[in-house]
Amino acid sequence: MQPKKQKKLLSCARASIKQGLQGSWQREPASLDKNGLGASFVTLTLQGSLRGCIGSLEVRQPLIIDVWQNAFNAAFRDSRFPPLDQEELDDVQIAISILTPALLLTVDNEQDLLNKIRPGVDGLILEEGNHRATFLPSVWNTLPKEQDFLLHLKRKAGFADDYWSSSIKFATYQTISFTE
């Protein structure tokens, strides 16, 4: 992705958060080019710690709108954190990850899955019934071992550490990621 397009998306994300802090947030950006579909995650960090992360796993709308909405949601609707406040705005760092389409993996067991995922490259989606969770490829920076990556993803989805089922589904994707 061209640096100019990255800068535009980062500016869009920051504008969405500013608008949210002003209480005048609109569901779509007013005057931005809405061409090009895409799925994104917006991650906010404050002094190196996660402050919010919300995204889309499937393409549903123009990328710019997806980033706009995910930035707002990461700042104000991530249930793990209180809403971002004005005092944090200047210090919060915004990162955007644009997702490739997910590819369903065929696996026979947990070891087979661990052999197929690529540390530092693949994001992973786990899904079964009403349980669904994902880790972006950037999570490999904090969980570099395949077993730990999967274990924490299972926990995030609400499963026990040793959970396995023949109906559990996994998919991988990659990202183009950039930050302010």
Image (cartoon, rainbow, N blue to C red):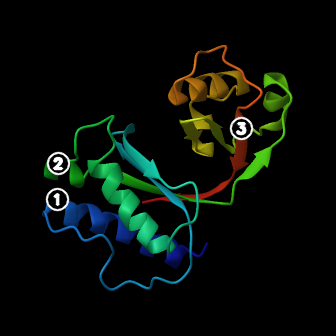
Residue 21 has which mark? 1
User: Which residue: 34% across, 43% down?
Assistant: 78
In which quadrant is the C terminus drawn? bottom left
Q: Percent position (x, y) of residue 18?
A: 22, 64
Task: Report the Cα–Cα distance between label 3 and label 1.
Answer: 38 Å
Q: Do the residues labelled 2 and 3 touch (CB within 8 Å)?
A: no
Name which residue type carries label 3.
Lys
State the image quarter where residue 115 is shown.
top right
Q: At numbered mark 1, what does the secondary structure look like: helix, strand or loop?
A: helix
Q: Percent position (x, y) of residue 16?
A: 29, 66
Q: How many marks?
A: 3
Q: Residue under circle 3?
A: 169
Residue 85 has which mark? 2
Q: Is residue 153 above or below residue 79?
A: above
Residue 96 has which mark? none
Q: At numbered mark 2, what does the secondary structure look like: helix, strand or loop?
A: loop
Along the line of sight, the residue nearer the viewer: 9 or 34 = 34
- Decide which of tag 2 and tag 1 comes sooner along the chain: 1
- Decide which of tag 3 and tag 1 comes sooner along the chain: 1
Q: Is residue 102 visible?
A: yes
Task: Report the Cα–Cα distance between label 2 and label 3.
Answer: 38 Å
Q: Are marks 2 and 1 in contact (CB under 8 Å)?
A: yes
